[in-house]
Image (spheres, rainbow, N blue to C red):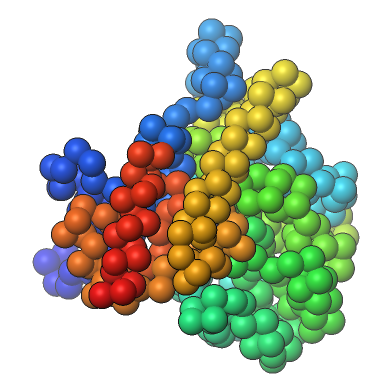
Amino acid sequence: ILDTLPPLVSDSLLAIIALVNADPNPDKIDVGVGVYRDGQGRTPIPASLKKAEKRLWEEQQTKAYLGGYGDVRFTAAIRPVALGRHADDARIGGVQTPGGCGALALAFKLIAAARPEARVLIGTPTWPNHQPIVAGSGLRIVEYPFYDRDGTRIRFEEMVAALKSGERGDVALLHGCCHNPTGADLDDEQWSEVAQIVAERGLLPVVDLAYQGLGRGFEEDAAGLHKVLDSSEEAIVAYSCDKNFGVYRDRVGALFVKTGVEAATKHAMTHVLQIAREQWSMPPDHGAAAARIVLEDPLLKAEWLEEVAAMRDRINSIRARIAAADPRLAFVAEQYGMFSMLPLSKDQVVRLRDKSIYMADSGRFNVVGMSNGQVDRFIAAVIEAMDG
Ligand code: PLP
Ligand code: TYF
């Protein structure tokens, strides 16, 4: 039976990891997949998390099953970080998930259970995992242009028109901050307008928040989400801790579901749990337990917030360096998070690989993929590619 399956194209971002690994050049520049690297080019485990892991190892008495909700103290502890003034809203239910991907998968399968005819409005370009995750739920995707690559700006009028074309019960997938792949985030005013339109049209917002703290700051990066929660009776948040806790492979995330009344949220959460049971039954514990220890300990939490601030500062200082190098790259300083898209064609991107510089075919690059010592070489190669 299985030999009838045709081959599929692999995840293009994960394919770049393989290309990088196959390159023997010790000074190769990997600005492909989105993992934070420090000035030395390492992806460190935050010291706060490392201490929490030590404590976990010393104090954990059992690894017996926790149940479908995962670590409920973890979900309670990340709640105020993600939801801010909405953290005490009893109409918002939460569950631990295997990363942001797990949260997104649950979110769309939940929506499909409630309203299989819902359409999901997605601004493009978007993170290339969004479409398969949504399609995997069986929901229909309607794409609209989100970003003007040549003008390096958000196509806000088109976004507004697309959201206004949505019908009651359709879904708006929104990047909470640090837009992947463009780095182009809505400003406060635009968030207010989006939140208002979404509420007026009766759309269900799904906010994907995978980089909180890495853009402008923890509160700022969730400000758009909080506006959406202010105005929409129903909303879903897919949260990832993998970047801001540096626990990528441990798969740490959470799903938050808001409905208009507490009883309806309780019912919805029984469906969330049923879907989780079909997918993975229970989320992995270790990373979430370590993150929970950090969040519950004021000293560790303060240390963690500083460590995330240092990541954010490095992102923004490399952005400033790149922007200062050439007027055509000035836009990089106006964008947030790990990614921006360079004005390069696919051919130009592929030719950079001959110089051991690896980025996504789209020209998306990870601002902090390179070490401090590699920045000048990277900038020179990009300028040469743009000229060539
Ligand atoms: N959403 C976006 C926009 C992302 O870039 C990522 C990146 O990994 C995720 C969600 C999922 O994160 P996780 O690795 O926690 O599944
Ligand atoms: O966009 C990125 O590079 C990150 C990491 O299937 C990632 O979001 C990439 C692909 C994937 C999962 C995570």
Instruction: List x then y, in percent, for residue 345.
Output: 32, 76
Instruction: List x then y, in percent, for residue 379.
Output: 37, 56
Q: Is residue 132 above or below residue 170?
A: above
Instruction: List x then y, in percent, for residue 371.
Output: 38, 40
Q: How many marks?
A: 0
Question: Which quadrant of the figure has residue 187?
Answer: bottom right
Residue 293 seen in the current view: yes
Instruction: List x then y, in percent, for residue 186.
Output: 69, 68
| Residue name at image x 66 percent, y 60 percent | 176
Locate the C terminus and report the quarter of the image it occupies. bottom left
| Residue name at image x 64 percent, y 65 percent | 185
Q: Is residue 302 above or below residue 155?
A: above
Left or right relative to 218: residue 214:
left
| Residue name at image x 61 percent, y 63 percent | 334
Q: Is residue 214 above or below residue 9?
A: above
| Residue name at image x 16 percent, y 59 percent | 354
